[in-house]
Amino acid sequence: MSKNLNFTMLLDVYGALLTEKQRDTLDYYYNEDLSLGEISEEMGITRQGVMNCIRNCEQRLLELEEALGLVKRFTELKECVEKLEAAVSDGGKSEEITALINEIKIRL
């Protein structure tokens, strides 16, 4: 997974645990694809301040993911569902489908 996509997912899941200023900064950087200079102008802080905020927020999001693992869990469940969908559409064996359903139940 690309770094930007990973942090975008982390922001979606854990963004509510950041301050409004932190969320806005990361949203501008990852979702709006603004440059450090553009964010600096928008937020009224220096480019260095923007970079420090992004680094600190990225570290915080990684710590939250390490502690809670919600994005990893979501990704694993999504992969299981995709395998199940493929097995059903391919007329998979009932044992294979049952195994995939059980794997999903375990991960829930």
Image (spheres, helix red, strand yellow):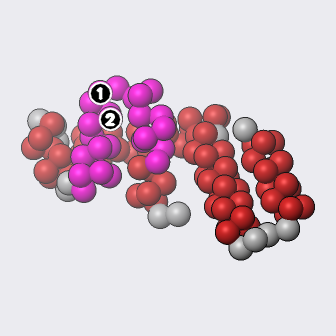
Quadrant in the picture for residue 57: top left
* Location of mark 1 (residue): 20
The C terminus, quarter of image: top right
The residue under the point 32% across, 52% down is 30
Residue 44 image offset from top left, x and y in percent: 11, 36
Instruction: Specify start and end residues of the magenta stretch as a single range.
Output: 9-33
* Location of mark 2 (residue): 23
Residue 8 image offset from top left, x and y in percent: 41, 49
Q: Is residue 26 magenta?
A: yes
* Left-right relation of 26 to 74: left
Cα distance between the residues tagged 2 and 1: 5 Å
Q: Is residue 65 visible?
A: yes
Numbered-mark total:
2
The residue under the point 54% across, 43% down is 62
Quadrant in the picture for residue 105: top right
Q: Is residue 66 visible?
A: no
